[in-house]
């Protein structure tokens, strides 16, 4: 339930930022795309999945951020393992933006 509330809040805030046109920080979907790119770069550089998850957990990130990044790591190392870093980032950002549009309706 906490994940749903956090995700909903982040999507609404990023949508409001886009609507106002004054977003000084990256939107949630841009952040997710950048995070996916970083994870894919780590994958391409030979860092193992569980080592990367351990690093995320040891950095003291918030629970909300961990609950988004750890499944992202799992996707990048799993079903998206054959995609380039740029393709992974683009795909994650597009999925997020599509979900945002459908969520608003």
Image (tube, rainbow, N blue to C red):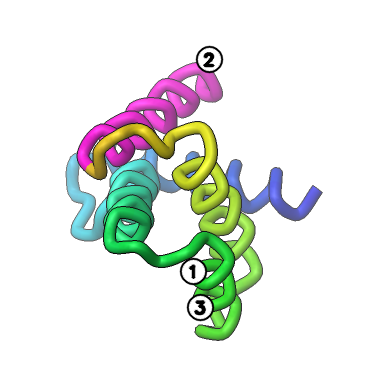
Q: Position of residue 77 (x, y in %)?
A: 48, 46
Seen in the picture, residue 54 relative to 27 is either above or below; the reply is below
Marks 1 and 2 sit apart, C-alpha to C-alpha, by 36 Å
Residue 63 drawn at (x, y percent): 65, 69
Q: Mark 3 packing: few (<14 Cα in 10 Å), some, or many (20+)? A: few
Q: Residues within 10 Å of mark 2 (few under 14, many from 20)?
A: few
Determine if residue 19 is in view: no
Farthest residue to the right: give it. 1
Q: Which mark, residue 55?
A: 3
* Element type at mark 2: loop
Nearer the observer: mark 2 or 3; the answer is: 3
Q: Earlier in the sequence, mark 2 or mark 3?
A: 3
Residue bearing the label numbered 2: 105
In the image, 83: left or right of 96?
left
* Image-quadrant location for residue 53: bottom right
Dot 1 and dot 3 residues touching (CB under 8 Å): yes
Residue 20 versus residue 101: which sits nearer the camera?
101
Asked if residue 96 lies in the magenta stretch, the reply is yes
Q: Is residue 81 magenta?
A: no
Image position of 63 with respect to 9: above or below: below
Which circle marks residue 52 in the picture? 1
**What secondary structure is found at the residue carrying circle 3?**
helix
Magenta-tinted stretch: 86-105
Whole-percent x, y for residue 27 in the image: 31, 48
């Amino acid at each position: 339930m906490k994940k749903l509330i956090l995700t909903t809040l982040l999507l609404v805030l990023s949508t409001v930022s886009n609507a106002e046109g004054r977003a000084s920080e990256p939107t949630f979907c841009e952040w997710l795309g950048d995070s996916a790119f970083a994870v894919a770069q780590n994958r391409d550089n030979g860092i193992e999945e569980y080592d990367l998850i351990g690093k995320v957990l040891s950095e003291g990130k918030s629970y909300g951020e961990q609950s988004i990044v750890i499944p992202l790591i799992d996707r990048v190392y799993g079903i998206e393992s054959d995609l380039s870093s740029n393709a992974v980032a683009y795909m994650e950002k597009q999925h997020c933006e599509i979900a945002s549009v459908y969520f608003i309706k």
